[in-house]
Image: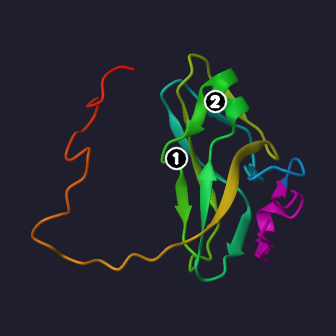
């Protein structure tokens, strides 16, 4: 497993909260915590921007992806509106999460609650080449459902 160093900064309104951390030895995502000043209620169908109280400096060639927590999705229908959210290596502002409640009940976000996870990935840069025709493939231009139900 490859390791990289990432600089994290706790912002003033989150000095009492933990830095992102892996919940287990083999976890791929770092847990992010809600840095809300007071509880935030998200009703069914509503979405809210939730601060995490941290900023970071990713090395060039890497990106951060903000992903939902499976337990919140399964138990409460809480997920991330723009999942996965992307954090570019040159962004230095506060990481914030757009949570949406797809469940049937209101959900209360409390300070320090784990609300999302951060996965860091190495990037591949694309060299775009404009062409008139693409090489053929077995699938061709078959779109959604082209291969049948099973």
Q: Is residue 94 left or right of residue 128?
A: right
Residue plotted at (52% across, 47% down): 83
Q: Earlier in the sequence, mark 2 or mark 1?
A: 2
Q: Is residue 138 left or right of residue 78?
A: left
User: In the rendered structure, does residue 76 fall within the stretch colored magenta?
Assistant: no
Q: In the image, residue 63 lies at what x, y percent? A: 59, 69
* Mark 1: few/some/many CA within 10 Å (<14, 14-19, 20+): some
Q: Secondary structure at mark 2?
A: helix
Q: In the image, residue 80 lies at what x, y percent? A: 56, 42
Start-end of magenta stretch? 1-21
Q: Which residue is mark 2?
A: 73
- In the rendered image, the quadrant that contains the C terminus is top left
Residue furthest to the bottom in view is 60
Q: In the image, residue 98 lies at what x, y percent? A: 55, 47
Spatial CA distance of label 2 from label 1 is 12 Å
Q: Which residue is mark 1?
A: 83
């Amino acid at each position: 497993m490859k390791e990289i160093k990432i600089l994290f900064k706790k912002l003033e309104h989150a000095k009492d909260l933990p830095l992102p951390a892996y919940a287990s030895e083999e976890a791929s995502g770092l847990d992010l915590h809600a840095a809300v000043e007071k509880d935030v209620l998200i009703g069914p169908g509503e979405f809210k921007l939730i601060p995490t109280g941290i900023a970071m400096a990713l090395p060039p060639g890497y990106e951060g992806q903000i992903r939902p927590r499976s337990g919140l999705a399964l138990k409460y229908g809480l997920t991330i509106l723009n999942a996965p959210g992307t954090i570019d290596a040159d962004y230095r502002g506060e990481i914030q999460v757009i949570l949406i409640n797809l469940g049937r009940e209101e959900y209360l976000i409390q300070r320090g609650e784990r609300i999302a996870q951060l996965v860091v990935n190495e990037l591949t840069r694309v060299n775009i080449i404009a062409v008139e025709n693409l090489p053929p493939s077995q699938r061709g231009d078959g779109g959604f459902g082209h291969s049948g139900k099973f």
